[in-house]
Image: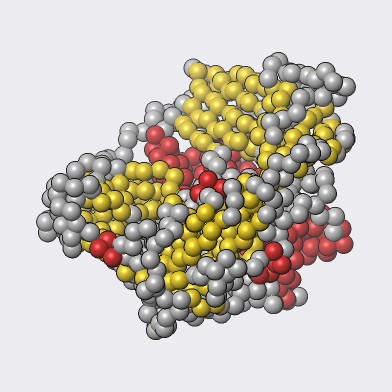
Amino acid sequence: MPHRTDVVVTDLRAEHGAPLLGLGTALPRLSWTARAAADVPATWEQSAYEVRVTPLPPVPGAEPPRSWSSGRVDSGDSVLVPWPAAPLRSRERVRVEVRLWGRDAEPTSFSRPLVLETGLLAPSDWTAVPVGPDWDEDPGVDHRPALLRREFSLPGPVARARLHVTAHGLHEVEVNGERVGDEVLAPGWTSYSHRLRHRTHDVTHLVREGGNAVGAWLADGWYRGRFGIRGGSRNLYGERTALIAQLEVDLADGRRVVVATGPGTGEDGGTWRAAHGPVLASNLYEGESHDARLAVPGFSTAGFDDSAWAGVRRYERDPATLVAADGPPVRCTREVLPVAVLTSPSGATILDFGQNLTGRLRIRVRGCAGDRVQLRHAEVLQDGELYTRPLRTARATDTYVLAGGGGTGEPEVWEPRFTMHGFRYAEVTGWPGRLDEGDVVARVHHSDMARTGWFSCSDDRLNRLHENVVWSMRSNFVDIPTDCPQRDERLGWTGDIQVFAPTAAFLYDCSGFLASWLRDVAVEQLPDGTVPWYVPRVPASFWEPPQPGAVWGDVAVLTPWVLFQRYGDVGVLRAQYASARAWVDLVERLAGPDRLWDSGLQLGDWLDPAAPPDRPAEARTDRYLVATAYFAHSARTLARTAHVLGEQEDAARYGALADEVREAFAREHLRPGGRLSSDAQTAYALALVFDLLPEGEREAAGRRLAELVAEDGNRVATGFAGVNLVTDALTTTGHDETAHALLTETGCPSWLYQVAMGATTTWERWDSMLPDGTVNPGQMTSFNHYALGSIADWMHRTVAGLAPAEPGYRRLLVRPRPGPGLTSAAARHETPRGTAAVSWRRDGDRLVVDVDVPLGVRAAVDLPGRPVSEVGAGRHPFEVATTTPPPPVPSPPRAAPQPA
Ligand code: RAM
């Protein structure tokens, strides 16, 4: 059939870019992007699609596989389109192709194929059971990690081999001496009792006919290592580590050999054995100790003598709790070399990596057997020394004892396996000989999501702020969304991600990552609807058992909504609906008939800069005002969710509830003249952005907010509850210049104060480092927290001017509000429908704007002094007169007083 060549289907993907191997669903939703290969009318829109699915058997058969086709489906959908074919079975491999029609008869050609393969979809597919070393351990301490191994033989040539694997604890697997995959901290952290994630690896190239061996390293990790605030606790999920591995090999003759973890002897006579290895201790907070003299070379190769090894014990695990991972794995994404080698006043050698980050060091060292290198990590220096008080009880210390070979032999290369640190500086002690460039490198680790969002402007201080936001996101998206990566905490605080999610969803594709974590929010929710302060829960830790608290608990409603807005994912709304409803129902009961939530433990506007360092909830805005405002906003968002899901009765009920709470808020908190009961930035920000004021009062409230900002000398005066709203509250009430003044202020507290102080990530407190260069005395002082970086979402939407106007960016809102002092700004985003971009620059008294709209998308373009216009796909230049001449760009802040 003839086809059109001017439109091509690109970027065909399944679910949220989930791993294509070991897919955990029988019905993967498909998404694709249409791109113009030549000049295509801006009005081109998909009107129909066809999906072709071709089975790919494991062993190429004589029969050519027959394709299945959906036929032409009349639909403009291109994002998370339901699987059109029969449900996939476990271990099924298929090739998927898509073609599209516009309004005319000729389709595009088929897309490049996407190959998908399901994993083990049914609990009954699992024959593997957890096995761990058969020796006695004291449950009161962290343990020396074990090695496991087993041999097996394959009676013929191999067609395909898959390893399905997870663990109680952390694991790293090797087959025939080679590491499988590059995932770190596998299987990550979920509410293990309910959901333990596994992954599927292609190991076809690692196995062969004849003798083979599989080996594994195990460690405590979150499962049973010391973890949690205030010293934490051990054995959160169990007292014993264990591996769950199922290696399935399809031979060329069609037979399948399965080598699974289990007790006793397998069908082929092989048994699992266990021994200690060279890792002496490993803990996420403490760090890792490795004695290379105890290495066990060749333990994962065939023929290794394990006669002195111990046997294994079997543990229980309901296979129904094993779920396929649906986000990207944690892995090393880049390496950073030191920018300086410092000698501290006490004579210590300290490496400065120039960037605060999450990861660990890899060293390359030559020396004698028994030489001991110690690496201590920290985010900051004080008085020129490594400053570790903010880490609290996390020792963040790695130790490597050399196997030896002297100064001339091959260098030994080592990186810890099962720990992670948040640091910019590392103190090195015991290094034998001279430390050469490249001997120590920081390896950055995080969940390896695709980068999707960029921002830049003419003010380098704002560029650095934005870069800091990106680094704090990377640092804290390590399998779950954490508050911080360095101290004895690193918990999935629900409030932090609730506030940051819109920014995150612009910068990276975190849809699968957050959808997975939200499942844990739902399973950890208490029967009465209480959402934990952090997920997964850590029993016996801080604020346990959890109590309901606004801002944090609202994650259950607001974060699925963000994922729907940004990724067009109705499925996540459906999956989280019961959880969202349970939260609002609970708050409704707690608030009672007056609709005011004015009881219980509320963190309110946490870390308002005016709060004393040791009492971070004592904010200027009343905590119960915050709670009622969030109640109204969540009820409203739930009503919208219900509407999208077709739950019309619920939509009406929660809409009415939201109206009542809105009225109650105004009755209780609004004073004559548009003042609020808390005359503070966060109070106005909440009231305006959550639309809680009668129409006639908005203007006065906006004016009062602008006055407050001016009275505060353009210093920000919000904590977590207002930080993501205050600039929107100003711009939606016509105070663009005040919003820009707030953004560009450099005095403490402000966003650029941190930048002026040399920050390379965003901080937990506005003043984690005090103006004199000393560290804030508060117990909680992290230099790597993302919540205060949630301003970046406004920078994307308003400084550059790129925002979604409809879910999944089906329509864009282009509405830059060029700040005085800026001469240009730009943002670009890989939307689910293709690349969208806005850039503007001042040219004399003109503003020159370029807008790029993906195919099939429309954009409302709202430029200062010009009626809103609607455009279709393609690049659109605009020019308008600017009204505010730019004041001179402020002089750069004084050099960063890094306390080094
Ligand atoms: C601290 C962290 C975290 C916050 C909680 C309430 O431990 O600052 O970010 O959410 O408190």
Residue 814 is drawn in which quadrant? Answer: top right
Residue 331's place in the image compared with 588, above or below, is above
Residue 414 is drawn in which quadrant? Answer: bottom left
Q: Nearer the viewer, residue 625 or 42?
A: 42
Q: Nearer the viewer, residue 569 or 597?
A: 569
Q: Nearer the viewer, residue 93 or 39?
A: 93
Residue 103's place in the image compared with 22, above or below, is above
Residue 894's place in the image compared with 169, above or below, is above
Q: Position of residue 133 (x, y in %)?
A: 45, 75
Taking the image as shown, residue 751 lies to the left or right of residue 51, namely left
Can residue 752 be spotted in the picture?
yes
Q: Residue at point 81% right, 38% down?
A: 66
Taking the image as shown, residue 426 lies to the left or right of residue 48, namely left
Can residue 696 be spotted in the picture?
no
Q: Residue at point 66% right, 66% down?
A: 126
Q: Residue at point 62% right, 46% down?
A: 159
Q: How many marks?
A: 0
Colour scheme in use: secondary structure
Q: Residue at point 76% right, 58% down?
A: 574
Q: Quadrant of the N terminus?
A: top right
Residue 265's place in the image compared with 104, above or below, is below
Q: Nearer the viewer, residue 797 or 245?
A: 245
Q: Position of residue 781 (x, y in %)?
A: 37, 62
Q: Position of residue 878 (x, y in %)?
A: 62, 20
Residue at the extreme top of the image, as rendered = 39
Taking the image as shown, residue 671 lies to the left or right of residue 477, namely right
Q: Position of residue 61 (x, y in %)?
A: 74, 41
